[in-house]
Image (cartoon, rainbow, N blue to C red):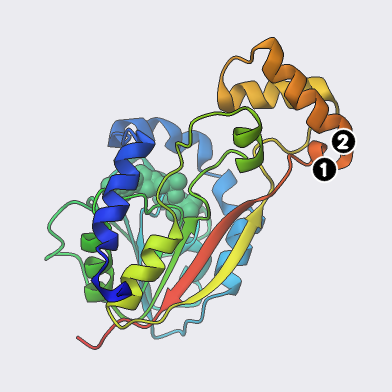
Amino acid sequence: MIKSIDFGQLYREHLARSGRVFKTPAQWDSKAAQGRGKALDSSYRTAFVSRMQCSIEDTVLDIGCGPGTIGLALAGQVKQVYGLDYSQGMLDAMLENAAELQLDNVQPILASWDDDWSEVPVCDIAVVSRASIVADMDDALDKLNRHARKKVYMTQLVGGRFVSREVEALLGREDRSFPDHIYIMNMLYQRNIYPTLDYIESPSRLADSNSLEELLDKVRWSFGELSGDDEAKISDWYQQDPQYAQQGGEPMRWAFMSWTPPKH
Ligand SMILES: C[S@@+](CC[C@H](N)C(=O)[O-])C[C@H]1O[C@@H](n2cnc3c(N)ncnc32)[C@H](O)[C@@H]1O
């Protein structure tokens, strides 16, 4: 039964329902300078890299590499890192970071998930970190499996949202979540691939509120203007367990999936 379900189609339907508007490379370009340094110092980055295995002989393809968050953390331990991104601004930021770190084995590739990857090198390891809300997941998984010899490491949002599920439900807002990792787990299973699954937790976007007012501001930022009724609901939620509410409720969870691609 499960093998006959078209999870690729379900993924596309879920993505359409989410109303996802894909950013242009230029929109990412404008974020690149501001995020350049910050990317290299985060508990998420440490958590991602600590779950990987690589050796000094390995080549790494980091897809949607951004300013080099994961690729640059690996560059000192592997032979070569290729950072692939469709934003020239992000690739420039990665190269600036690499120069500051005196890394000379980092090469940029200006390309998109949607391009023909015949010129993209096949590497030992493929990495996709926070960069896989793609239009066509079947195609993305095929590309990853063709371009990695030893291992693929990928993170995808659990529940498909950056904002709190609890607060979304509390406010009765429409479910606009993105397709999450469960589609990918099923699509890999259907390809006779058996990924390992782990979770990386980050504080909720509503975290670090020291008062109800601060929490309300954060909720407005994520959910838009609040009615008096909405504010009363958030206030009740806050009063029930102020400590939990101040940490923004549930943490944001990234599913960390890794698998061995089929032999080429
Ligand atoms: C959220 S950032 C993640 C950067 C980095 N991997 C990290 O974890 O910090 C997403 C990156 O994916 C890139 N990106 C988005 N859509 C893409 C596409 N269709 N093809 C290639 N890169 C894309 C963006 O330019 C951006 O650098």
View extreme (top): residue: 228
Q: Is residue 18 visible?
A: yes
Disc 2 on helix, strand or loop?
helix
Name the kind of residue labelled 1 in the image. Tyr
Q: Position of residue 50 (x, y in %)?
A: 60, 73
Tell me how far mark 1 sits from mark 2, CA to CA: 9 Å
Q: Position of residue 164 (x, y in %)?
A: 62, 40
* Other residues around mark 1 within 10 Å, as few (<14) / some (14–19) / many (≥20): some
Q: Position of residue 80 (x, y in %)?
A: 36, 73
Quadrant of the rendered structure where residue 121 is?
A: bottom left
* Residue ID at (78%, 36%): 208
Q: Position of residue 88 (x, y in %)?
A: 30, 42
> Which quadrant, please, contains the N terminus?
bottom left
In the displayed structure image, the side of residue 99 where residue 26 appears, left or right: left
> Which quadrant, please, contains the C terminus?
bottom left
Residue that numbered label 2 is attached to: 240
In the displayed structure image, the side of residue 217 where residue 222 appears, left or right: left
Quick check: marks 1 and 2 in contact, CB under 8 Å?
yes
Name the kind of residue labelled 2 in the image. Gln
> Is ligand 1 closer than 8 angstroms to the Cβ of mark 2?
no
Disc 1 on helix, strand or loop?
helix
Quadrant of the rendered structure where residue 44 is?
A: bottom right
Q: Is residue 164 above or below residue 194?
A: above
Residue that numbered label 1 is attached to: 244
In the displayed structure image, the side of residue 105 where residue 238 appears, left or right: right
